[in-house]
Image: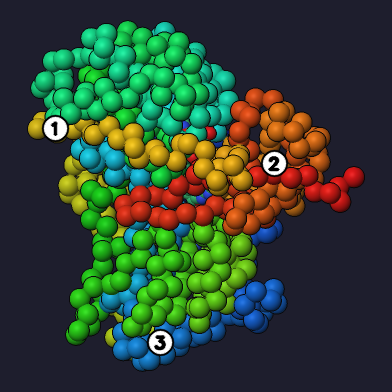
Amino acid sequence: MLGMPTFRNTCPRHCYGSCSMISHMSGGKLTRVVGDSEHGYTRGRLCAKGYSLIQYALDEYRLKYPLRQVRRGSGEWRRISWDQAYEIIASKMIELNTRYGSNLGLGYYKGNGNAGLLHQAVEGMFAGLGPHTRPIGDICSATGETALRETVNELRNPDPEKMSDAGLIVIWGANPANTNINQMKFIYEARQKGTPLVVIDPLLTHTANRADLYVQINPGTDAWLAWGIAKLLIESDKIDKEFIRQKTREFHRYKQGLEGITLEEVCSHTGVHLRVVEELADLYARFHPAANWLGFGMQRYPTGGESVKAVSALAALTGSFGSVGGGVYFRHRPQEEFPLHIAKHQGVKQPLLTSSREVPVNDFPGKAMKLQEPPLKMLWVSCGNPLAQDYNLRAWRDLFQQMEFIVTVDLYLNSTARQSDLVLPAASFFEEEDLHVSFWHHWLSYNQKVLPAFYEAKSDLQIARELTRKLNELQPGFSNFPAEKEPWDWIEGELSPEIRELYGLEEPADLKRHSYRRKKESLLSGWNYCFSRVQPHLFKDMRETESSLLFPYHLLTPQSLLKFHTQYETLSWLNGENREEPIIELAEEIACKHTIREDSLVEIYNEHGSISGRAKINPYLPEKIILVEQSDRYPINHLISGQGKAGESIPYFDCRVNLRRVRSDV
Ligand SMILES: Nc1nc2c(c(=O)[nH]1)N[C@H]1C(S)=C(S)[C@@H](COP(=O)(O)OP(=O)(O)OC[C@H]3O[C@@H](n4cnc5c(=O)[nH]c(N)nc54)[C@H](O)[C@@H]3O)O[C@H]1N2
Ligand SMILES: Nc1nc2c(c(=O)[nH]1)N[C@H]1C(S)=C(S)[C@@H](COP(=O)(O)OP(=O)(O)OC[C@H]3O[C@@H](n4cnc5c(=O)[nH]c(N)nc54)[C@H](O)[C@@H]3O)O[C@H]1N2
Ligand SMILES: [Mo]
């Protein structure tokens, strides 16, 4: 490899790792990507999806040209030029503006497809138009964030590299062996020093397989287990009284609340034996400090916030906050410390309108359909596949029907693109420049452009610039998005003196040689923890209801090892089989009850829809759980529905189904 040119990239997936990569080129080809060994979190190691990115870069299934669909949903596509595409889009935008006297009829939806800061060009492009319709919230982690703001008070993730110094690691509903492989190094290091690892999950996951203690819990009941542990810790006086006195509020209200629940209730709701609850309390009492990992999985329920609060209280009771390696790990938002000039761009002023209309993403189609004066008429979808990955998919179909014009920007003709009028081919991150921070670790890194555009693909930023120019050509002054700025201009703009100080970066260009770790990370001096109320009545639907009798099984659809939500399904290195139907995993007992054999054709269904696939008997699954992967080919989310509450994410795991064998199957 000596002498071969290498480049710096950052994996842009919405993932814990935001891995820093070194890409090797040979003969004009991308031949190898490896983890950056100098990056303190990546440490030279990528996941299988990371190593397969060279196949992704040139994937034959990628979109190559702008496409127009003759009639939406017809599947008849015509290749058009970029100029034609811009002309069609800009004319429609101007027409809607003339019809309604503002740009409120224009809106966008952005998914989590690319976490780079320059991908906020989508937000920026719309901001340039002045008041418009935009999404707010977070489908993935808002429930936990809201809960932590009420209790822990701030959202600052301890440095996850320090997890190796914890005295006890308890993972509540995360599966890092699948979703965050680089964290496993720090967990293994801790275990080598004798730190016990506990995994609490309804599924015996790859991570659970590596634990000292695996606790199989009923879905959605973590709050109860945490309350049970807390009760035992308080009753046996194994709490950090000094920490509680100095650094917390509302302890007595919390303690009283715990007196209102019994250990019998804890065991019956969680399905965890009293001896195991006692063992957990004993581990929390003996090993310090405790690293409590609040996984995204455990908060994907309507009562997920209660679980997050209840588990965070264990960190307060044991005084784990602020000790090296201890505390609560969930996520943080380091980008909020950046200027974010691109997203916060001040758009064209409208005389009578002061602000944009906001649509919460946890009920996007429901709320967007109700907008009036003007109604929403044009939707721009970027970096997301809501027709497969959101919930309430029937409402999404209704919303699409109501739209006059839908544009999707993506690398693939996915479920959402297939229902759009116009599809624009997005560049992969190898074809563009970007800047990255992580929602988990503390590093800042750069992404260099290493490949020429794949056919006619363009980055979201380039599209924003070119569409802005077309709009202004057709109607001068329509947008003031700074179309002249180059990617590096935006990057330099983000590296303000404060940011350079925070990351110890002397010159912006230094980022082209190294990644930088954030320097400040301790809790603020006036910090304190607020114990929340213990509210068992919020779990009222734990009793069997009519609906739970009709649909007795919990459907769990967590993240898979070799896919990224609906991404990478076409890559043969990762997902060679190219299955057209899902695998429906079920327990032996359910198979027996429904006379289902391995590979039988089965259907799972509820009041929202049905999906059929091949049965796989999984002897490790609890009796009441059915497990299916997320996919673009057979979106399982047709079965997932609910109501988004303010400030919460989507309760994806709150889904009940029933099951039957498909009779025609022989
Ligand atoms: N390979 C891969 N990695 C990814 C992703 C991917 O798609 N593929 N996606 C990325 C994204 S966007 C995210 S948000 C993260 C999410 O990654 P994780 O935080 O690991 O979250 P999930 O996969 O949603 O769920 C984690 C675990 O929660 C468990 N669980 C479900 N219900 C409960 C419950 O009630 N209590 C408890 N204790 N556990 C429960 C599930 O069985 C699952 O094993 O992963 C990121 N990394
Ligand atoms: N059943 C179920 N559903 C879930 C979850 C679950 O656990 N269970 N998890 C939820 C979670 S945590 C999340 S974060 C969401 C993820 O939801 P989405 O973000 O909608 O999911 P992806 O399938 O990753 O789709 C991202 C799309 O962005 C495209 N893309 C990638 N890079 C770029 C780019 O640079 N520009 C543009 N324009 N497009 C790009 C990809 O090709 C892909 O089509 O899914 C949620 N849905
Ligand atoms: Mo996510």
Task: Give the amino acid type for the residue marked by disc 1 in the picture.
Answer: Trp
**Circles 3 and 1 in contact, beta carbons < 8 Å:** no
Number of residues whose C-alpha sits closer than 10 Å to that of mark 3, classed few (under 14), some (14–19) or many (20 or more)? many
Name the image quarter holding residue 629: top right
Which disc is residue 584 wearing? Answer: 2
Q: Is residue 463 left or right of residue 489?
A: right
Name the image quarter holding residue 277: top left
- Real-space Cα separation, disc 2 to disc 3, in angstroms: 45 Å
Q: Secondary structure at mark 2?
A: strand
Residue 280: x %, y % from top left? 40, 14
* Sooner in the amino-acid sequence: mark 3 or mark 1: 3
Task: Give the amino acid type for the residue marked by disc 3 in the picture.
Answer: Leu
Q: Quadrant of the C terminus?
A: top right
* Residue found at x 54% / y 52%: 640
* Sooner in the amino-acid sequence: mark 2 or mark 3: 3
Q: Which residue is mark 1?
A: 527
Q: Secondary structure at mark 3?
A: helix
The count of marks equals 3
* Sooner in the amino-acid sequence: mark 2 or mark 1: 1
Which disc is residue 86 wearing? Answer: none
Number of residues whose C-alpha sits closer than 10 Å to that of mark 2, classed few (under 14), some (14–19) or many (20 or more)? many
Which disc is residue 96 wearing? Answer: 3
